[in-house]
Amino acid sequence: MTRKPQTELRRGWTTGACATAALKAALAGLWGGAIPGRVTITLPKGETPEFDIVDAALGDGWAEAGVVKDAGDDPDVTHGATIRVRVRASAGGVVFRAGEGVGTVTKPGLPIPPGEPAINPVPRAMMDEVVAEMAGEHGAAPDVEITVAVPGGAEIAKKTWNPRLGIEGGLSILGTTGIVRPFSCAAWIASIHRGIDVARAVGQAHVAGCTGATSERVVQQLYGLPDHAMLDMGDFVGGMIKYLRRHPVERLTIGGGIGKLTKLAQGASDLHSGRSQVDFDLLAEWMGDARLANMNTALQAYEVAGKPLADRVARECLVRARTMFSEGAAPEVLDIVVIDRVGEILARAGP
């Protein structure tokens, strides 16, 4: 597991910011005849970072430039990938195309409609602004076809949510601020939101939020759920439920290992080991067994107390989850699945 260092962490740049910088360099080549070695762009909140340009090329009516993504100290799967942009004169404004390694949206529910390149609204707006700026500088019409590519992006995308969100063929060009903040919870929670949006848009009534790959596999097989019903909840059960209160579904299953679900049962909404801990005194109180107060893990406590402990954890999780839904729309059906490390179901609660 990657742990957050204790020292100050270095920020990085989103794929959207990198694509915008590559576009600016390519437009300088298309309209000015020379591609610069560095460019400066303006991010949505006013910051003006500089980017080194790689893979510059000019041809008959087109220009291309690239930027190597630097995600800073964040363990981003696209760190080190080259974001390439090719531009050519077009007609009727700005047109976006998906090049090698950039996906195409195939399902409703995302900010971009089906059939469009998976280039999100903020990066599109940033690139539109650069086109207008550079067209003004060079006295050119702001009519261009922009093709964004990420060589190797189709393989990288397999490590992301894109396949289950219906983004086929590669990565998404993302970013709302242009900045990657190391170990930020916001990106993960945003992915949960997009998963919920897609499930609702395609009429998926039953979704499942799971803490990890093993619990996801168990719950998916248990209910025969499609990939787009599975929400990679991780530690963020609170963030998932908060969004579901405003964007409801008919049925929600919460699945996870006994360690993380014990923390949910005891009132935690963030299940990360650095932000919540199992209360072993409370486990001892629940089970009337003083030995549990001296345990090191919830799994160890289960090995001592047996199935009654797992049953109690499942029931308390159900109560806690229902309480978290009390301020908004709640699913008609809510259930809990508690598993062990190898994927055996220890307990269930709910219909």
Image (tube, rainbow, N blue to C red):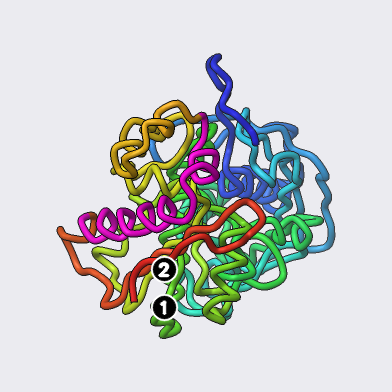
Task: Give the residue at x 43% y 31%.
Answer: 291
Of the pair 96 and 215, the residue shown nearer to us: 215
In the image, 183: left or right of 159? left
- Give the magenta part as a residue range: 296-323
As helix, strand or loop, the secondary structure at mark 1 comes to: strand
Residue that label 2 marks: 253
Task: Give the residue at x 69% y 56%.
Answer: 159
Percent x, y for residue 289? 37, 37
How much space separates mark 2 and mark 1, taking CA atoms?
A: 8 Å
Q: Quadrant of residue 277?
A: top left
Percent x, y for residue 230? 52, 68
In the image, 213: left or right of 65? left
> Which of label 2 and label 1 is nearer to you?
2
Q: Is residue 325 magenta?
A: no
Identity, as a three-letter code, of the amino acid under mark 1: His
| CB within 8 Å, label 2 to label 1 | yes
Task: Give the residue at x 35% y 54%.
Answer: 312
Q: Main secondary structure of the magenta part?
A: helix
Q: Badge 2: few (under 14), some or many (20 or more) residues near its Cα, within 10 Å?
A: many
Percent x, y for residue 116? 57, 75
Q: Residue furthest top?
A: 7
Task: Give the residue at x 20% y 69%.
Answer: 329
Q: Which mark is residue 206?
A: 1
Q: Quadrant of the N terminus?
A: top right
Label located before the other in sequence (2 or 1):
1
Q: Is residue 318 magenta?
A: yes
Residue 91 visible in the shown view: no
In the image, 340: left or right of 207? right
